[in-house]
Amino acid sequence: MVGCNAGGGMKVVLTKPLSSDVESEDRAPNVLHRILSLFNNVRSGSDLTVFRLPPLFNFPKSHIQCYGEAVYCGGSELLSRCSRADSSLDRFTSVLAWSISTIRPVAFGVAPYNPILGETHHVSTGSLNVLLEQVSHHPPVSALHATDEKESVEIIWSQHAIPKFHGASVETDVRGKRQLKLLSRGETYEMNSPKLLIRFLPVPGVHWVGNVRIRCQESGLEAQLCLGATSFLGLRRNSRSIKGNIYETSTMKTLAEVNGQWDRIVKVKDINNGKETVIYNAKEVLSGLKTPIVKDLEGVWPSESAAVWSELSQAILSKDWDKAREAKKDVEENQRELSREQESRGEAWVPKHFTATYTKDGDWECSPIQSLVPPAPIVVPP
């Protein structure tokens, strides 16, 4: 944990990023029983976007921070390889490896905070600058913009999570357009996110599952990937598996096969010569991740996630649950008060850093207002 404050003013609490060895910490006895008790009055199939967890089941960071960490922690070297590769297939494979690096294990029994409207997270690592903003609260929609002038790379993502309760599990459909642009190559790669599955019975666990499609219209290449979970009875034979094909969109000709486990090793096999290459090693990428630090406290915005939730994060780290409940209540009450004030003035809230549009197909389109993300007051140390 890294904390920073000045003269009794703004406090910023940053905690270590999620890595490949994340484990659930049972802060309460009989954690499974207590989690299930929270859903006693929730019907199967219900949307859980307005469901509030007590602090006992939170870990000390917001969803928007976890979302940002997937981009600025661990994958910057993989990102730089994307535009440097000479052939279109090598660039596509590099993008695929980087996309896998954004998938992180999730601990069972704990969850991050639901971001408040207008909450931001602004972090730099090397020449990559990353900015996120919560552009909608009901439904919860997060937008991300990242730019790296040195590597000529831009990332534009939106994330709209829809969790639903199904009795013995919660399944979260993670919607939103995700684009990685290699500006020097004139290529845009579009991809989606897998679903997040939380099983309570018979064996508790959290899994990323489902189909992921990565497509580059300019190169005419596409990948279809399938992520598998541990079996229903908890057998680990296919735990965190990923497999699929890279092929030409126009001819549907398969060029390479993808196989492995996204939290361990992923290989690509060239169909023409049978050569296998390791494109992703989770241990190398995600081990030793460094906690961001505050480089310029005066430059931190009041909307910064690590500042908004600092009192709650500090209380959770100290296991002071009475203080945690009060801190969480204060943030939520302030949010509701600001909403009431805007409604009384007949004003609609407008994001500061993105334009957000609800599309006809039930999704959200988020576009950054600025072409470049400025360097951040919070940085990942070298």
Image: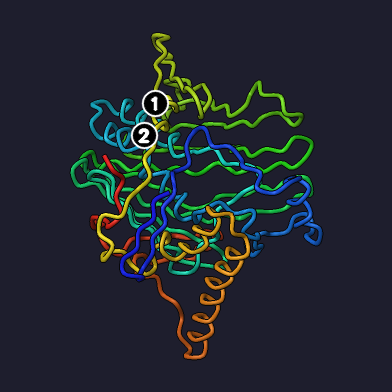
Residue 340 located left or right of residue 35: left
Name the residue that disc number 1 marks: 284
Element under disc 2? helix
Residue 337 rendering spot, x and y as whole percentages: 53, 81
- Between 19 and 316, the residue placed more toward the observer is 316
Report which quarter residue 23 is drawn in. top right
On screen, residue 82 above or below 147:
above
- Between 200 and 324, the residue placed more toward the observer is 324
Residue 102 rendering spot, x and y as whole percentages: 44, 39
Q: Residue at x 24, y 46 (%)?
A: 148
Residues at marks 2 and 1 touching, judged by CB atoms closer than 8 Å: no
Residue 170 located left or right of residue 328: right
Residue 222 located left or right of residue 106: left
Image quarter where the C terminus lies is top left
Q: Residue furthest left?
A: 150
Residue 275 rendering spot, x and y as whole percentages: 40, 10
On screen, residue 7 above or below 20:
below
Q: Amino acid at mark 2?
A: Val
Name the residue that disc number 2 marks: 95
Circle 2 Cα neighbour tier, 10 Å, few/some/many (<14 / 14–19 / ≥20): many
On screen, residue 296 above or below 248:
below
Q: Residue at x 41, y 74 (%)?
A: 350
Residue 172 rendering spot, x and y as whole percentages: 62, 49
